[in-house]
Amino acid sequence: MSYLTDIGALARKDLRLELRARDTLPAMLLFVVSALVVFHFTLPQGASRLAAFGLLWVALIFTALLGLTRCFAAEREQDVLDGLVLAPSDRSAIWLGKAIAMLAFLVAAEVVALPAFALFFGPGIDGRTLAGVALADLGICTVGTLLAGMAAASRARELLLPLLFLPLAIPIVIGGVGASVNGGVRYVEFLVLYDAIFAIICWASFEYVVTE
Amino acid sequence: MVAAVTMIAFFAPEDADQGLSQKIFYFHVPIALTSYACFGWGAWKGLLHLWKRSPGADLESYVAIHQGVIFGALTLVTGSIWAKISWGVWWAWSSNQLVLFLVLFLFYAAYFMLRFSVEPGPRRANLSAVYALFGVALIPVSFMAIRLANDFIHPTVFTSNGPQMSGRMFASFCVSWAAMLLLAGTLYRVELAGKRLDSRLRELRELLA
């Protein structure tokens, strides 16, 4: 029970910090809308609506990446991470709390992005796409938060995260695009599998990322 | 290795369909399998490091992944040559294995970026080990993903291409694979010895200074 309380406290800390400082979420919102506008001009006249779905996924992945690079920024600047590691709780709670906060930011960005996409590009968002986006969000946040923790420990920092994250995000993109373009249940199932596998690995290995 | 080359050249029958060019198969596939073996070995050593804290496992994991990346790059090159000869293009997105190797190559190239931007020490060893473990999870997951992706990129090209090998072909293939594994093992030992010497030298220098 105290594990859940810890997670709740850590996630609340991040959300409250964001409510007071507002550095990540407005940037993500602005980025995703501007990216969609740029993508409108990259599509030639008469391109199919399927191509537009591909661009939606590019926009979502890069918006998530933008948020993830800021993920451990506050902890690093104020040296909070050492304090969190020393706190008498399971270290994986740090990861889970962070991932939940990231998920909240990402969902908030998508609440704006998906209607904007429907408005700009025309194709409606169906249930399969929504399921794909929701499951992809889970995968992005679990894997991305752990990799952000890794990148925070390195000298390259913001530079390193996209390099670590994009190869791991390729299966998410395939599953997500498949779910929205093909509408196959198999893609949704695949995303569930991906989320489950990587959530377990991240949960088990986060301790080693923050400790020596 | 010599035995493998001889067997490939003289013993294995030529493929009826592709002729001489099919012989690159005896290099390409063993190199690819060897590269998987290296990644797996690297992840296993990473796991040993995290679990048992065995000294030196970190270095062994790094060297294994280094070998894996070298063999992975060779797989991409030989695969590309084979694709050019048999399909007429240097790159085919419909070839699952080739695309998988591209993804893995990018993933493990990032491993080096990670490793070289963290100060040497226990922290770096932990991060590398966790990342190596991610790699072995990524291999089957992206294999599945790429198979799924072919459905919407190339809806019709989805046939099981199980190469039915004759006995002689299979024997040559096995010898060639054994030779590749042996080569990888030797390179692994050589590089490991070099790296160990290097770190020992550095320790001694620090003691002197």
Image (cartoon, grey):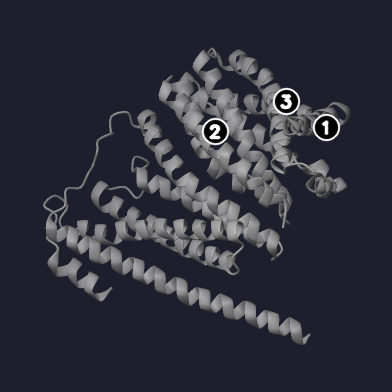
The C terminus of chain B - image quarter: bottom right
Q: Residue at coordinates 53% horizontally, 26% vertically from top-left?
A: A43
Which badge, 2 or 1, is on the more N-terminal residue?
A: 1
Instruction: Judge by depth and name the residue closer to the eye, A152 or A109.
Output: A152
Instruction: Judge by depth and name the residue closer to the eye, A58 or B140.
Output: B140
Dot 1: chain letter: A
Is residue A44 something one can see in this rendering?
no
Q: Residue at coordinates 40% horizontally, 68% vertically from top-left?
A: B184
Q: Note whether A183 is above or below A38 in the view shown.
A: above
The N terminus of chain B - image quarter: bottom left
Residue type at mark 1 is: Lys
User: Residue A16: x percent and y percent?
Assistant: 84, 28
Mark number, residue B60: none
* C-beta proximity under 8 Å, tags 2 and 3: no
Q: Residue at coordinates 65% horizontally, 83% vertically from top-left?
A: B201
Residue highlighted by disc 2: A195
**Front: mark 2 or 3:** 2
User: Residue A184: x percent and y percent?
Assistant: 41, 21
Dot 2: chain letter: A
Mark number, residue A29: 3
Q: How busy is the neighbourhood of tag 2: few (under 14 within 10 Å), some, or many (20 plus)?
A: many
Residue highlighted by disc 1: A13
Question: Which residue is farthest bottom?
Answer: B208
Left or right: residue B187 compared with residue A85: left
Which element carries disc 2, helix, strand or loop? helix
Q: Would you identify the image quadrant in which residue A137 lies?
A: top right
Q: How busy is the neighbourhood of tag 1: few (under 14 within 10 Å), some, or many (20 plus)?
A: some
* C-beta proximity under 8 Å, tags 1 and 3: no
